Amino acid sequence: MHIFRDPRTMLITLGMPVVQIILFGFAITTEVKNVRVAVFDPSRDVSTQRIINRMQASEYFDVAQLIHTADEFNSVFSESKADLIMAFSDRFDENLMHSGKASVQLITDATDPNQATLLAGYASSIIADYQQELLREYRIPYLIETEVQMLYNPQMKSAYMFVPGVMGLILTLICAMMTSIAIVREKETGTMEVLLVSPVKPVFIILAKVAPYFTLSIVNIISILLLSVFVLDVPVSGSMFWLSVVCLVFIIVVLSLGILISSVATTQVTAMLVSGMGLMMPVMLLSGMIFPVENMPAILQWISHIIPARWFIEAVRKVMIEGLDVSNIVKELAILTGMAVFLIAASVKKFKVRLE
């Protein structure tokens, strides 16, 4: 009877397993789905068109755009227009029919080496199937040479993928969880009443509580970057200034989120459950930290848009790993800034200056 009368216990015992099985069942997948392909086809002949049609007919790939010049290659990845570039050699069909040999290049973004390897493997298998079809049709051993190029991470180091994700996870845990617990602890022990009746304004009480975690987050960012560069050999390819700006904006976002949680929660246990289970699991599964967002169902992709860590991880990868300039992270910075403004306003409005 006690369990049935406690909605929080019912939510944990009955609701959490449902949420976990849905998240783990759909978010954790190594399958390739909804991969956007950009095609560079200077010859535009029969063979290239048949391969493109095979790619389009596949359930794994979607031909998103055609590239007309080689100068567009860099913008495809920097502007997130596609996940894979398939570049055919000039006079593809003519070379294939006369010399029995032609080449195609597959270019992927290797900041996620596992995903890049899967994409290249799936695309290569489609090309190999077409090659076998030619063999059955003409009885001639045609050879289509497939060259795979991994951009941004030619050594295929997994650290290139995990460092931005770990930064987002650590900042979320330190800023959101620790801040929410610290403020709720004051409510439980009764010292918040003393602080509220003092001449100090509530806004300064909040700032005093978040200042230590803001400082600790900066120290953690510095230590992570130093370890990444000097121990894991992950270079900072882009601007250190804009990388710092992205980190500072994200710290403000998650600190504001922690304050909002503390304004709603009444006990440390509640604050820990909300900030821990409610933030840590979505950050790990839905932010693109481990599993590509593009491979998830549409509803989970939509939910991932409201997770701040997703935009932070994307911005860090672009600046730190891909070495892109600020023009390529305007979208991520704008979204994080908007989230910070919204969460700060909601936190100030929800913060109670009187305790019951």
Image: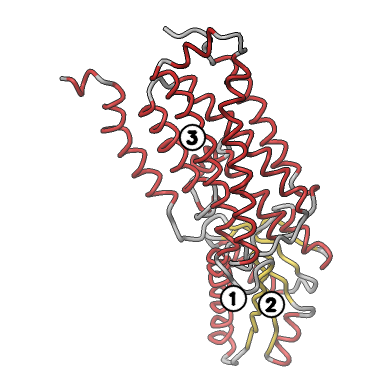
Amino acid type, mark 2: Val
Mark 1 closeness class: few <14, some 14–19, many ≥20 residues within 10 Å:
many
Mark 3 closeness class: few <14, some 14–19, many ≥20 residues within 10 Å:
many
**Residue pointed to by mark 2:** 104
Q: Residue at x 27, y 27 (%)?
A: 9
Q: Residue at x 54, y 83 (%)?
A: 132
Cα–Cα span, label 2 and label 3: 52 Å
What secondary structure is marked by label 1?
Answer: helix
Could you say where residue 197 lies in the image, as x and y percent from the top left? 53, 7
Mark 2 closeness class: few <14, some 14–19, many ≥20 residues within 10 Å:
many
Q: Which mark is residue 127?
A: 1
The reply to whether dot 2 and dot 3 touch (C-beta < 8 Å) is no
Q: Which mark is residue 258?
A: none
Could you say where residue 291 lies in the image, as x and y percent from the top left? 50, 54
The reply to whether dot 1 and dot 2 touch (C-beta < 8 Å) is yes
Q: Earlier in the sequence, mark 1 or mark 2?
A: 2
Image quarter where the C terminus lies is top left
Q: Residue at x 65, y 84 (%)?
A: 145
Amino acid type, mark 1: Ile
